[in-house]
Image (cartoon, helix red, strand yellow):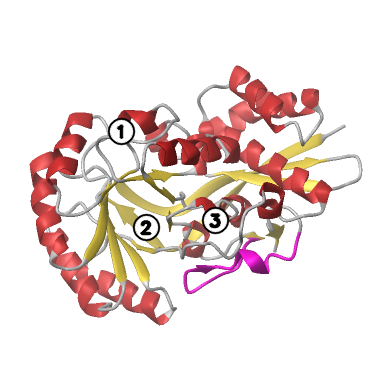
Amino acid sequence: MLSTEFERVSLPLADAFTISRGTQEVAENVVVRITDDSGTTGVGAAAPAAHYGETADTVEAVLPDLLAVVGSVGDPHAIDRTERGLRGVVNDNPAARAAVDVALHDLAAKRLDVPLYRKWGLDPERVPKTSFTIGLDTTDRMREKTRAAVDGGYDILKVKLGTDRDEEIVAAVREEAPEARIRVDANEAWTPREAVRMTERLDAHGVEFVEQPVPASDPEGLKFVYERSSLPIAADESCVTLPDVPAIADRTDIVNLKLMKTGGLAEAKRMIHAARAHGLDVMLGCMIETNASIAAACHLAPLLDYADLDGALLLADDVYAGVPIEGGEIRLADVDRAGTGARRT
């Protein structure tokens, strides 16, 4: 028998976080706990995004039905059967499904008394560093954020763009972080022709790649940019579900996956393998999330080319600790707990 529960947690951010679509000051996450007869508990969390049609309210609305599936299956190791059941109840709402999926994976690994990466047979030494995100702000404030990130040991920066001063911002960040690897994310803000022009200008500042330059609703625009860009292109909003991977394989270099888009770890692994089959590089990103979900994402890191798993680092205070991250180093080999390593602080 498995018992289940969930709670909403409001997590203030260390600093207001702005992208081209708006500003966030608090992250509303929903934490799921699944407990077996021995008292062992698996933990997961949903970090819903309104951009994908989810809120904390919608997560709380569907979780009773999703958790009823968990109870009816009754076996945390039966991930595939449970996942089919979850999709049968709620096909959308991926963040809600991800919370349940992560909690099941955490519980299953705890019952085997191994960290999750060992359950999968992955190499904890083969882990890319995570980037640290510099949200939109005044140029001077973005300089300050960059300086603080570099002082904190982060040498891979992801810079949010989508303003009328994008080149000025990148020049300022580069000035403050001359040795850093810089990636930029426009969050769908540019037209295809603007994007091509921007890649030429950003290339001069040593930018590594450009993420989601144009709206996901314009796949031909993405292809236009990909075919003319001076820099590699990463697709985020254009790559949400498994069928999206082959659909965009001829118009991007990198896919950016997130557990809150894929609906959990099982689907994320399938999408990683699909991307590899189509010759694409893979990045795993995140929303602004508690370590109850970020910790699980870290266990996929050995399968990645790029990581953007700083969501919990942007919080003023997290209710969960997770996989240690120091200066961008995801210290997966240091996880000394079974499961994902997430634990209540």
**Height in image: 91 above or below 180?**
above
Few, some or many residues within 10 Å of mark 3 (<14, 14–19, 20+) = some
Tags 3 and 1 touching, CB below 8 Å? no
Q: Earlier in the sequence, mark 1 or mark 2?
A: 2
| Label 2: which secondary element | strand
Label 1 environment density (alpha carbons within 10 Å; few <14, some 14–19, many ≥20) = many
Residue position marked by numbered label 3 in the rendering: 302
Q: Which residue is mark 2?
A: 17
Whether 251 is among the magenta residues is no
Mark 1–mark 2 distance (CA, rounded to whole Å):
29 Å
Task: Decide whether residue 333 is among the magenta residues.
Answer: yes
Q: Is residue 209 above or below residue 53?
A: below
Query: Where does the magenta region start and end?
Result: 321-337
SS for tag 1?
A: helix
Q: Could one spot residue 115 in this view of the protein?
A: yes
Which residue in the protein does label 1 denote? Answer: 248
Occupied quadrant, residue 226: top left
Q: Which three-letter amino acid code belongs to the residue tagged 1?
A: Ile
Q: Is residue 148 above or below residue 58?
A: below
Q: Tell me whether circle 3 and circle 2 mark residues in contact (CB < 8 Å).
A: no
For residue 38, side relative to residue 334 (left or right): right
Where is residue 286 shown, x and y percent of the image? 46, 50
